[in-house]
Image (cartoon, rainbow, N blue to C red):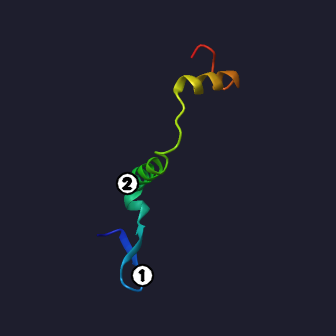
Amino acid sequence: MKGIRYLVDERQEKVAVQIDLKKYGELWEDFYDIIVAESRKEEETVDWESVKKELKAEGKLPEDV
């Protein structure tokens, strides 16, 4: 595939990939977002109302939001 290169180990097994970001930059961003989301799926969540209350207390969000 043009713009994609696989790096292989001594057994010729694929261990990494190089992506031409000029050609596939937008796809890379989507792929990266998926990796980040997957890595965080076990993290504790915080509900929006708690976040909003904290941001208002810190003056980072207007009171009328």
Please give the name of the residue rendered at 70% of the width and 25% of the height, measured from the top-left corner. Answer: 58
x, y percent for residue 7 = 41, 76
Query: Which dot, 2 or 1, sits closer to the camera?
Result: 1
Secondary element type, mark 1:
loop
Locate the N terminus by quadrant.
bottom left
* Front position in the image: 21 or 53: 53
Relative horizontal placement of residue 41, taking residue 2 as reference (left or right)? right
Secondary element type, mark 2:
helix
The part of the image, by quadrant, that contains residue 65 is top right
Please give the name of the residue rendered at 40% of the width and 50% of the height, measured from the top-left corner. Answer: 30
Labelled disc at residue 9: 1
* Distance between the alpha carbons at the discs numbered 2 and 1: 26 Å
x, y percent for residue 3 = 35, 68
For label 2, count other residues whose C-alpha is less than 10 Å away and answer few (under 14), some (14-19) or many (20+): few
Height in image: 7 above or below 27? Answer: below
Direction top: furthest residue: 64
Direction right: furthest residue: 58
* Front position in the image: 7 or 24: 7
Height in image: 33 above or below 51? Answer: below
The part of the image, by quadrant, that contains residue 11 is bottom left
> Is mark 2 in CB contact (under 8 Å) with mark 1?
no
The residue identified by callout 2 is 27
Residue type, label 2: Leu
Please give the name of the residue rendered at 31% of the width and 69% of the height, measured from the top-left corner. Answer: 2
For label 1, count other residues whose C-alpha is less than 10 Å away and answer few (under 14), some (14-19) or many (20+): few
Residue type, label 1: Asp
Height in image: 47 above or below 29? Answer: above
Relative horizontal placement of residue 31, taking residue 51 as reference (left or right)? left
Direction bottom: furthest residue: 10
Relative horizontal placement of residue 61, taking residue 36 as reference (left or right)? right
